[in-house]
Image (spheres, helix red, strand yellow):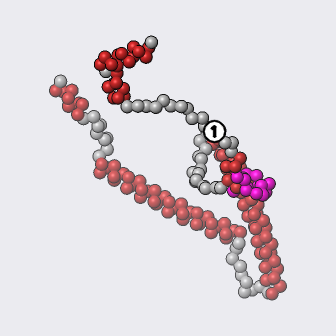
């Protein structure tokens, strides 16, 4: 029994890695992730600059005449128009896809039955305002609901008068009470 009691007290298994080693590995992983993120940012920046350089090379404006500058401006405006049209087309496609995704996700939630119900607030509304909201412009005058209610008359049941039971006990006690019972029965 002595060996079993020490096994029961040590219910938590000891970790395979010490706390200091775990902390060291965690910091090392975080440093590695930070360097990877920085490298990714630099790569994206270089890619962006490369694409911009391809699509829009640097201009040498000093050696161009006025007519050449005007033709260059026209070409640039045409490029801007084409790019704007592409951007608009892409934005409209994205908006359509977003709406479709939203509709499909709403259908999924409805099918699953996990639709989140909004919190409702208590709102005080008069009877006339409620009718106006429900029926619209059809109701022009306020309706008095209390006047339209049926009146119900309550019938009062006849209740026996409740007397003090102690007086009754005193009157019926002794021979006089029994004699009264006997006399009233005949």
Residue 107 image offset from top left, x and y in percent: 67, 43
What segment is highlighted magenta in the picture? 129-144
Residue 57 image offset from top left, x and y in percent: 70, 73
Residue 172 image offset from top left, x and y in percent: 34, 21
Q: In this view, does 3 lie above or below 20?
A: above
Which residue: 50% across, 60% down? Answer: 37
**Nearer to us in this view, 79 or 85:** 85
Residue 90 is one of the magenta-drawn residues: no
**Nearer to us in this view, 170 or 134:** 170
Which residue sits furthest top? 186
Which residue: 60% across, 55% down? Answer: 123
Magenta span: predominant SS is helix
**Nearer to us in this view, 132 or 32:** 132
Which residue is the site of mark 1?
Answer: 153
Residue 96 image offset from top left, x and y in percent: 73, 54
Compared across the picture, whether 35 is left or right of 112 comes to: left
Residue 133, visible in the rendered structure: no
The crowd level at tag 1 (other Cα within 10 Å; few <14, some 14-19, many 20+) is few
Compared across the picture, whether 21 is left or right of 158 comes to: left
Q: What element carries label 1?
A: loop
Q: Quadrant of the C terminus?
A: top left
Quarter of the rendering containing residue 74: bottom right
Compared across the picture, whether 29 is left or right of 156 comes to: left
Compared across the picture, whether 183 is left or right of 65 comes to: left
Which residue: 24% across, 31% down? Answer: 8
Q: Quadrant of the N terminus?
A: top left
Residue 186, visible in the rendered structure: yes
Q: In this view, does 115 lie above or below 30?
A: above
Which residue sits furthest left? 2
**Nearer to us in this view, 95 or 160:** 160
């Amino acid at each position: 029994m002595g060996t079993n009691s020490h096994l029961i007290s040590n219910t938590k298994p000891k970790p395979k890695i010490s706390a200091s080693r775990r902390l060291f590995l965690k910091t090392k992983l975080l440093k590695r992730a930070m360097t990877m993120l920085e490298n990714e940012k630099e790569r994206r920046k270089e890619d962006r600059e490369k694409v911009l350089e391809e699509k829009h090379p640097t201009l040498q404006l000093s050696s161009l005449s006025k007519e050449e500058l005007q033709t260059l401006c026209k070409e640039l405006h045409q490029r801007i128009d084409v790019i704007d049209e592409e951007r608009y087309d892409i934005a409209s496609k994205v908006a359509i896809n977003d709406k479709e995704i939203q509709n499909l996700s709403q259908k999924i939630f409805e099918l699953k039955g996990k639709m989140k119900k909004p919190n409702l607030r208590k709102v005080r509304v008069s009877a006339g305002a409620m009718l106006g909201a429900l029926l619209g412009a059809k109701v022009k005058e306020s309706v008095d609901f209390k006047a339209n209610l049926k009146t119900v008359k309550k019938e009062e049941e006849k209740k026996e008068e409740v007397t003090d039971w102690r007086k009754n006990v005193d009157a019926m006690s002794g021979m006089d009470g029994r004699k009264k019972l006997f006399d009233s029965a005949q």
